[in-house]
Amino acid sequence: MNTFLEYYRCPEECAPFAFPAAPSGQPGYFQFGPDVICFGRLGGMRTSEEPGRDLNDVLPSVCIQDSHCRLPFDPGEVVENLRNERYVNGHHKSATTPGVRFSAKKAYSRIRPFIPVFLRRHLQRLHLHGWKGIHFPNWPVDRTVDRMFERLLALSLRTTGVPAIPFIWFWPDGYLSCAIMTHDVETSAGRDFCSQLMLLDERRGIKSAFQIVPEERYEVTPAFLRSFQERGFEVNVHDLNHDGDLFNEREQFLQRARRINEYVRKYSAVGFRSGVLYRNPDWYEAFEFSYDMSIPCVAHLEAQRGGCCTTMPFFIGKILELPLTTSQDYSLFHLLDDYSLEIWMRQIRIIMEGHGLISCIAHPDYLIKKRARRSYESLLDFLAHLRARANLWLPLPRDVNQWWRERSAMRLVRRGDTWQIEGQGKERARIAWAKLDGDRLVYSFSQDGKPAAEALGSQRGSHMPKVSLPESVSILK
């Protein structure tokens, strides 16, 4: 249960789960309660090839016996399949053959910089036709991985019989959620607008990260790079030349990865984002940057469908993934023709209810026009309001990377009848407690290493998600 312990950073005895060592059969879809769709193997039980409606719900078969919670699947396998989008090769297949898809994507990527925005928008809408009918992942935000962990934590409370379980809170200094602002610079016009965009961010007290394309798109001078660093902003690498071919062929990828690593060192960058959010997590071991920001939590409106189904950071080998959890400005403005804050606010609300990471992309290239800029400024004002009123952390992405790495190395130790945190950065860490309130999982903070009397919901105005445990769950003593 390493994935469970890594997610919550709770004591090992709080993971009393048992599951088949080697479930048989091919991986498929099933449910773990009414709101959690899983993709993996089941021990002697039915799975489905498509994430449709009549999925096998395995929650009623969960058995609590001999101080163990026995599951018919391996949660670690399911989490790996979802986070790394291993389910995509099934129900997201295109009607065209792989060779045709590759050729079409390659041709489009080559001419994309020369296509007027109105024509590009039309072509992309044709490509995305039917996106509203995609059943899984769930748009506009998918928290499947997080909800599965919440259900497991609730089952742990039922199994162990303890009134509350301690864990290391997700964010430092008691922040309830986190938000990062990022800017991918795609063209010379966007490059020239970066200074004004920094000013818009600075007026709200927000520092952001700019992802720079190092080759072909525009000139990148030392003075241009210093302009970000001198004002306290972050510079990262954005692909190599943004032609969409980074992950097409393994040998070509390795050559490009070496050049990307050179630019990471040259720019003193810590993070990376691929062009058009193309990605292949299985190849990430070739990279030398510390964190990546290329995997959306749900990718209905992206060129590469799928999604990692979580709003929390997670590791892919040595690289930390900071998933994209909100819609890109381009998708809203040019594909949905929506300049309101409605979708962004809806996504932010869902993410904050689960205490997750709000990750935003706003391109300087698309904010030059006043209408788009007004929408972006409204988003900045909303985030600044949440920082003041809802205890939202608004750091640079590199600060999130540093915190999450420190948290992953921390551990809870018992000192008499209290719990304490050990590890670098512990002075910023908080012990949280999880307990059941009926069928709701609620969190609370404590200052003395003991369970607090009040839940975070009542202390901070944060509504915790429900974690239902139907009566059909077998509890055998």
Image: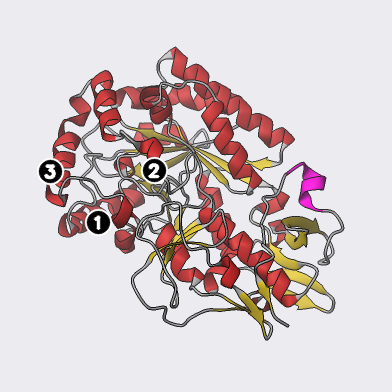
In the depicted view, which residue is nearer to us: 362 or 120? 120
Q: Crowding near pointer 1: few (<14 within 10 Å), some, many (20+)?
A: some
Residue at the spot 43% in from the left edge and 51% down from the top edge? 270
Which of pointers 2 and 1 lies earlier in the amino acid sequence? 2
Which of pointers 2 and 3 lies earlier in the amino acid sequence? 3
Task: Give the image quarter of residue 319.
Answer: bottom left
Of circles 1 and 3, the one toward us is 3
136 is within the stretch colored magenta: no
Magenta residues, start to end: 455-462
The tag on residue 103 is: 3
457 is within the stretch colored magenta: yes
| Quadrant for the C terminus in the image | bottom right
- Disc 3 secondary structure class: helix
State whether residue 283 is above or below residue 121.
Answer: below
Task: Give the image quarter of residue 128.
Answer: top left
The residue labelled by disc 1 is: 258
Q: Residue furthest top?
A: 370
Rendering coords of residue 40 (x, y %): 41, 67
**What is the C-alpha distance between the residues marked 2 and 3?**
25 Å
The tag on residue 72 is: none
Which of pointers 1 and 3 lies earlier in the amino acid sequence? 3
Secondary structure predominantly adopted by residues drawn in magenta: helix
Residue at the spot 23% in from the left edge and 49% down from the top edge? 246
- Disc 2 secondary structure class: loop
Q: Crowding near pointer 2: few (<14 within 10 Å), some, many (20+)?
A: some
The residue labelled by disc 2 is: 134
**What is the C-alpha distance between the residues marked 2 and 1?**
37 Å
Verify CB contact (< 8 Å) between mark 2 and mark 1.
no
